Amino acid sequence: MNDDKPAGKFAPVPPRRGPSQVSIGGLSLGLMLALLLPGCSTPDMKPFAAASRIVSVSVTTGGELAIKPLAKTPIWVNDNLMEPGDPAHPYMALAASWSERRKVMDAVLVYSTALAAISDASAHRQENATALLGSVQQLVATVPGYGAAFNSVGTLVVQGLEVTVEVKAWHDMRRAVASVEPAIQLVARGITLDFAEIARLYEAPLNDQLAELGASIRPVVRIEQALKHQREIQRQLVAADPGDSTKGAELLRLDGLYATALAELSQIRLARAKVEDEVTQGKAFFASAIRAVEAWAAANTELVKAFRDQRQPNLTLLVLRAEELKATVDQLKTQ
């Protein structure tokens, strides 16, 4: 392979189409076939792009499904009950934040597609090299706290986590992949940290809700237990003197009070169980999303090694994490 010089300044990235669903089964089969094909000196980027599409679509869809239940839930904020639709309701800020994270995952897809394109269309290496660096710049720009710009000699300078990485535009595929690798690892670290922060923002109002429900259930439990005890005593009195109408009327009164207390207690318990389920599902989604992004970054490193060793990349972990994430999102869809 020839060592080309870095390209100069690049034009803006052309508009992209939105992500589409890809069959997991087809992806797995395609990957396995790629892994079994011997004698290929140029790694096939299509399985990487396909798995990246699964991760991108699943993260986007799953995040919306995870936070959507909050929109319908009254939530206490600083001793004030925020009803659904209130501008101060926690869902509003969370939904706005997640809409920005959608752009991150779209950019992941654009980068992965550009990486496959520069490998696939050798006749247009100049254009594809430009698209690759443009996609890296776009990806960096979507991650909060990161930035990327071309310097005077056409090198893309990426900044984030108090680290600076330089990315040069090589037309040679091996050099191109190796050049973007440090930036991709830096960006992936930023994405996982950002998702962890979003997960905390998601859980915070739900944990507050659980605390409020816990505080409200305690006096109801005490009342329910007291009424249950009084009712049992009154039943014994009525059983000992069934002809006493006064004792019978008191038992009926206690039965009514106990039924009311029990209904209120059951309602609070159901509400608490619902919130606990939302917390559990949200934690599962964000944890799965973080693992998928980490696997995506590891797969990018594997591409660098595959080009160096002139072999097909082993993307098994990325495919596995993509399948796990999709399964988590499918579970959210059933709720």
Image (cartoon, rainbow, N blue to C red):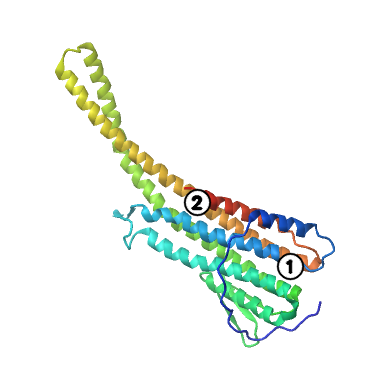
N-terminal-most mark, 1 or 2: 1
Does 113 appear above or below 265? below
Residue at 37% from the left image edge and 59% from the top image edge: 90
- Amino acid type at circle 2 is Lys
Q: Where does the image place residue 305, in percent across and percent down from the top left?
A: 76, 65
Whole-number angstrom distance, CA of label 1 to CA of label 2:
36 Å
In the rendered image, the residue lying farthest to the bottom is 152
Does 7 appear above or below 145? below
Q: Secondary structure at mark 1?
A: helix
In the rendered image, the residue lying farthest to the right is 39
Crowding at mark 1 (Cα within 10 Å: few <14, some 14-19, many 20+): many
Q: Where does the image place residue 184, in percent across and percent down from the top left?
A: 64, 69
- Amino acid type at circle 1 is Val
Image quarter (top left, top right, bottom left or bottom right) of the N terminus: bottom right
Q: Where does the image place residue 295, in percent across and percent down from the top left?
A: 65, 59
Residue under numbered circle 1: 304
| Residue nearest the viewer, comparing 84 with 291 | 84
Residue 319 in which image quadrant: bottom right
